Image (cartoon, grey):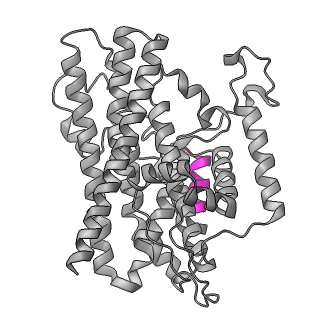
Amino acid sequence: MTSQAENTSGSGVVSAQPSKPVAGRGRDHRIDAMRGVALLMMFIDHIPQNLLNRFTMRNIGFADAAEVFVLLAGYASWLAYGRGFKKYGVPTILKRIFRRCVQLYIGQTIMVAAYVFTVRAWRHFTPVSVDYLEPELAHGMGWVWRVMMFDALPSNLNILPLYIVLLGGFPLFYVLMRVHRSLALVLSGAIWLFVNFDPEINFPNWLDPDGWYFNPFAWQFLFALGLTASAETQRRGGDLPRKGLLVAASVLYLVFSAIQAFPWTLWGLPDFRPFGDSIAPAKTWLSPFRLLDVVAIFYLVQSSDAARKWAAESKWGQILARVGRHSLEIFVVGTVLDLYARLIFSTFGEGWALQVAVNIVGLAVLFWLAAWLDTRRNRQRAALAART
């Protein structure tokens, strides 16, 4: 959820003997557009009664918007902070990382407060299941310190704490990259693999004996892949190398993933899954099936010049990129809107009129917010430029 910095020429930060820098190609709107798509799908997916969530990526692959979100968070973090250590100095970048973590923490606090007070107020007028929070959070105030210290993570409010942990660990990852270009990624992958063999290695969660839903020891590898890919594309001039064999392998895997993950019976169709129920990729510890799915998508997009052009020049590409550029605000507002949508469906039913109204209003609010934030930012930059 960090802001993506402008692409520049290659850097020697991750390599003792960097290749010759390639001229930058300007801001890569593909990252913003993909992140915008992920944010909108998260809004849709987090409303269980929403019929529109039958059409999001979780139905046509092992991975969903969360994996895309974390991978792109790593990619954008390198652009925002990784390149700045040599340019601005370590103290300055550490302050920026700390400031961003504080912003994420404030966003988390706003969402928790909105959830708790909304549910408690709503319950005065109509019954509301405590599932909208957690039984422990629906009564009393003894939970406050646990939630604020991330000892208790309610469902749907657990991805920002993950991001804070991952971003806080970024300086260590950077140091390892400086030691050797591949060392950080190898160690990160080893930790991920170890957790997949022993999923009980996790952060504690007072609300769930299994620990954090997004296990930081596993999901850090996806963040690390994003960081490494960002450093590599910067060194190469903005694109991953497009190799025919990798493209074919990625496409074939995504086809397999779509067939295996598609909810055939939900649509009243014969079950065409080649492995039936034998493949159930775990999300908590980031199963290899889910990891390969999001990596394949990322590679196809980031190695495609056509995707770069579409994101930069098409109307919808720019609309989605605008959503992605303001990811924290969009995520916080979208998550609160999810709660109201769930309450509306539970109270007034799940008919077509409400389905249409909830989705149109919710998406319109998010698109409007992104446009307003973009306009405000552009005015601030223009005012700053005029003063200088």
| Residue positioned 82% across, 55% down in the render | 248
- In this orientation, does residue 156 appear? no
Quadrant where the N terminus lies?
A: bottom left
| Residue positioned 52% across, 82% down in the render | 179
Q: Is residue 352 magenta?
A: no
Left or right: 252 as drawn, with respect to 361: right
Left or right: 38 as drawn, with respect to 131: right
Q: Is residue 189 magenta?
A: yes
Q: Looking at the picture, does residue 107 appear above or below residue 7? A: above
Q: Which residue of the protein is positioned furthest toward the left in this rendering?
A: 141
| Residue positioned 39% across, 80% down in the render | 85
- In this orientation, does residue 284 appear? yes
| Residue positioned 68% across, 60% down in the render | 306
Q: Position of residue 160 (x, y in %)?
A: 37, 47
Count all numbered tags in the image, as a single digit: 0
Magenta stretch? 188-199
Q: Looking at the picture, does residue 110 appear above or below residue 349? A: below
Give the quarter of the image for residue 154. top left
Q: Looking at the picture, does residue 340 appear above or below residue 373? A: above
Q: Position of residue 70 (x, y in %)?
A: 49, 52
Q: Looking at the picture, does residue 59 appear above or below residue 147? A: above
Give the quarter of the image for residue 240. bottom right
Q: Position of residue 385 (x, y in %)?
A: 27, 76
Work out whether residue 119 or residue 26 is closer to the camera in this orientation and state it.
Answer: 26
- Main secondary structure found in the magenta portion: helix
Quadrant where the C terminus lies?
A: bottom left
Work out whether residue 118 or residue 242 is closer to the camera in this orientation and state it.
Answer: 242
